[in-house]
Image (cartoon, coloured by chain):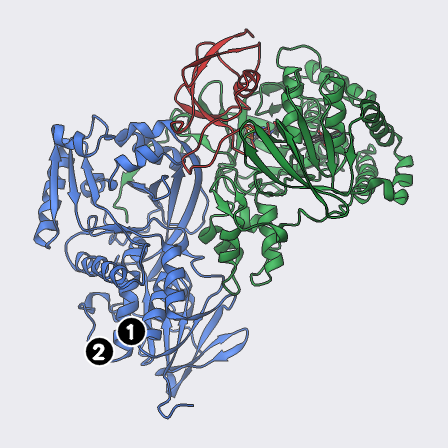
Amino acid sequence: MSRPQEHRCDVLVVGGGTAGMAAAVELAATGIRVEICEQSARLGGAIHRQPADGSPAAGLPRALGAQWQRLSQSLAHADIVQRTRHIFLGIDSDGLALFEDRAAGTVRTVRAAAVVLAVGAVERIAPRPGWQLAGVTTAGGMQVMMKETGRVPSGRILIAGNGPLPIALAAQLTKLGNPPVAVIESGDPLRRPGAALGLIAHPHIASEALGHLARLAVAGVPWRRAAALTAIERRGETLFATIVDRGGRTTQIGVDWIALHDGIRCNAFGLPASGDAIDSRPLIVRAGDCREALGAIAAEADGRRAAHAVIAALRGGKIARDGSSRRVAGQRMAQALLSELFRPVNLANDPRHLADDTILCRCENKTVGDLRWLLGQEGLSPREIKLNGRFGMGACQGRFCADSVMAITAASRSASVPEDIEQLTGSRWPLRPVSIASLAATETPTADTNHPTE
Amino acid sequence: MGRRQQKSAIVVGAGIVGAAASYFLARSGFSVRLLETVAPASGASGAADGAVSVASKRPGAMMDAALAGVALYRELEREGVLAGLFTPRPTLMVAETEAESAVLDGHAGALANAGVTVERHVGAALRARIPAIAPGVRMAVEVHGEGHAIGYQIVNRLIEAGGVAVERACPVHRLALAFGGTAVDGVVTDQGTLHADIFILAAGAGSAALLGLDGVLRPRKGQLLVTDRAPALNVSLHGSLMSCGYLLSKATTGTPDRSTERRYGLVIDPLRTGQFLIGGTREDRADSGNDLPAVQRLLTDALRLMPALAQLRLIRAFAGVRTATADGLPLIGRAAGLQNLIVATGFEGDGICLGPLAGRLVQQMATGATPEIDLAPFDPGRFALRRQDA
Amino acid sequence: MRSGQFTWQGQTISFRPGETIAAALAGAGIGDLGRDGAGAGLRYFCGIGACQSCLVRADGRIVEACLTPARDGAVIAALEPLA
Ligand SMILES: Cc1cc2nc3c(=O)[nH]c(=O)nc-3n(C[C@H](O)[C@H](O)[C@H](O)COP(=O)(O)OP(=O)(O)OC[C@H]3O[C@@H](n4cnc5c(N)ncnc54)[C@H](O)[C@@H]3O)c2cc1C
Ligand code: FES
């Protein structure tokens, strides 16, 4: 089939965060023709998100500030085609990489010899009654808004969930002049001295965390450990959060904003599988948080590692060793220590305790009760949960419900639990909903004959 | 145990045909085991559009079968078995050119002759009836008495209503024969050879390997698209919009061609969710991928009929593989000289419409009743089947 | 990159250079973005295009408010009519 104007490059890097930028720079340095595409208007990704008005980003720990300098300078001097506001849609069955070019309102295609997927992570948000309300964001979502605008939301803010990110967000809010009313943490890090001692081997993590905690202490922000936010209700202008504390006692806090965060996971939803080039399909390699969510230091090293793997495959020869893999391994140990430090002790957010009317899949408006009803059938397969229950079928393609659907399914024991989340979320394009007008505005292939349909 | 031994049946394949056969057999007193390689509706039944429609059929055996198929959906809906799962709605066949208008008029006549109620809309009446229709559309023929059903929902309901136990992840590897090769003794599975009085082969694409139908059965892939929800636009389209362009082409479902050429038959189906389903391609291949040229072509064709779709997004693309036969007609009947084996497969793009009917025909054959429609055109005996036993 | 104004449900909203639609609406105190076709509430949530719950109709196209820079003179509306 003839396809007019097929645009080609050697390597396409998808995602302009730390991992994608590092991979692109490393590849371009060897003379390989690289294109990098990013969905937002500026490169940077989760950690190096740049202010919307073009002013320099502020407030990162020194090691990360240096990382941005290094990556952005190298990128500026390298011969790399940068495409922003390009949403990666996937790779079609003919091996063609597809993007929606939001500025032009069209779909673009690239035929690449290799594709590095570096689309980062998404946050885990445990469903709770009311999590779908306006005024409730993810902690990362609140950070994005702050990084881009330099403004903090006005009014009372409550942060709840698990892990180091809620503390980091709280410290940022405090620094910008609006400390949160509290940070609710389901783990109990101060009672895990073993893990805390282990972090001494990772001084940048330890000192960053201590810095955040010191700032919160000075501002008098309570860090309520072994506690969980179990429900949100809106009454008038106020969001009321129900908090269950260590002893099982329940209190309510009224606020204007709630930021939730229960961890990080790879944003691998719907992505084409990694693997060697076959027929028209390019070599596909994943890098950074979308391969393994280990943070920004690891993402840079992992981007390089991915680049070396691609270079070896395209040019022949051995994969260059520069310590990248070792650095990733070091960060893996650090993250394991952090997980241990923050291991939840308050289990009130366990999906098994959820009321039936809790929204599970916001896109399809499906509740926990809908899933439980479905699971009443013996031996249900993942495919039936998806088709009959519509879980993972909505516009977000399971990014915010698939983990919980799996957890509730596993708890029910009547269904065969998907071994792999992909059985629920699938792997096909478009990875993101795409404008029909944009698709139609792209060059149309030659016409075939008509035929009756069913 | 009762004095009169209950008769047993093994049904191979839990698509819509196997589910329907199981349901009707269970209802007439058989003990039924439904064996499935993957899970219910994991083949074409779970990746199909769900037109329950006579509109696109050419006069003859298929039009007659479709009429009976639609009538059965109505009956099962009334009885409650398929309550809530069959959405009555007309098919709106549209013509964009003078030539298309002419063949569409002829087709409308043929449908009317078969007893179908059709209505012709042009000019202002057409715009009033289908407000979202493009200015370029000249004429529409509204085919009444049709409907829509979602394959996997029907499968699910029939299995439930029949109280049939599905054995998932239970592939049948081959048939074991008895009585000098004149009957099936059992089906060979990972759990050993399973026995029954009669066997129903409704394994879609998987039927070929069990019966040696490889020259007869062939894959015909179809790509389908799903849009965002758009409740107001969805409600304004009261039926399924179908381009009649295919009536102009010489190709029919029955052309025994081996060409790899891709063909398009455009349908815009307003789903009950408020989304639109846009289909579909016909391709002589068996993969389930989606490619940009096909998706673009379907969308451009759809926009030509209904420009307002440009405001929506494509949220999902998928592909199913239909099982077609060399002459375009399904196989329903006893096969390969095996007295206790009934085959029901090869429904290509009509299995959602004809599945329940096929199930009831199977039951009629199994119980010695007279089939409700003439099965001669669908007799598997018209092909020389090479058995894969031994 | 310029500042400017767009309308949201007929109301004029100012934005600063480079700001997304979501940021400008949040700046104006608007957090409830109406409902989608399934009847589910829309609002800013993840900030990275993943959750699909900040959808708006911008000049006729459905887009994520969190990914779309505001444009001077744009007409932005809720997906479904606000109650
Ligand atoms: C909320 C949050 C807070 C964090 N805080 C810290 C912290 O304080 N310290 C720390 O060390 N680490 C932190 N991390 C982790 C750190 O940010 C990441 O490990 C690191 O930035 C990962 O880099 P990456 O390149 O793999 O992913 P990212 O930086 O996320 O880059 C992925 C890029 O892909 C783009 N993209 C996604 N989908 C598409 C698509 N379909 N089409 C086009 N582009 C697309 C995204 O817009 C993004 O720019 C945080 C992570 C998150 C999510
Ligand atoms: S806030 Fe999640 S997609 Fe915009």
* Chain C tint as drawn: red
Q: Quadrant of residue A29?
A: top right
Q: Nearer the viewer, residue A207 or B66?
A: A207
> What residue is drawn where x is 42% and y is 52%?
B286
Relative vertical location of residue A154 with respect to residue B251 in this rendering, above or below: above
Distance between the alpha carbons at the discs numbered 2 and 1: 8 Å
Residue farthest along the bottom direction in this orientation: B3
Q: Label 2 belongs to which residue?
A: B369
Q: Chain of mark 1?
A: B
Quarter of the picture containing the C terminus of chain B is bottom left
Q: Label 1 belongs to which residue?
A: B363
* Chain B tint as drawn: blue
Label 2, residues with CA under 10 Å away: few <14, some 14-19, many ≥20? few
Q: Pointer 2 and pointer 1: residues touching (CB < 8 Å)? A: yes
Per the rendering, the mark at residue A447 is none
Point out the quarter of the image occupied by ligand 1. Answer: top right
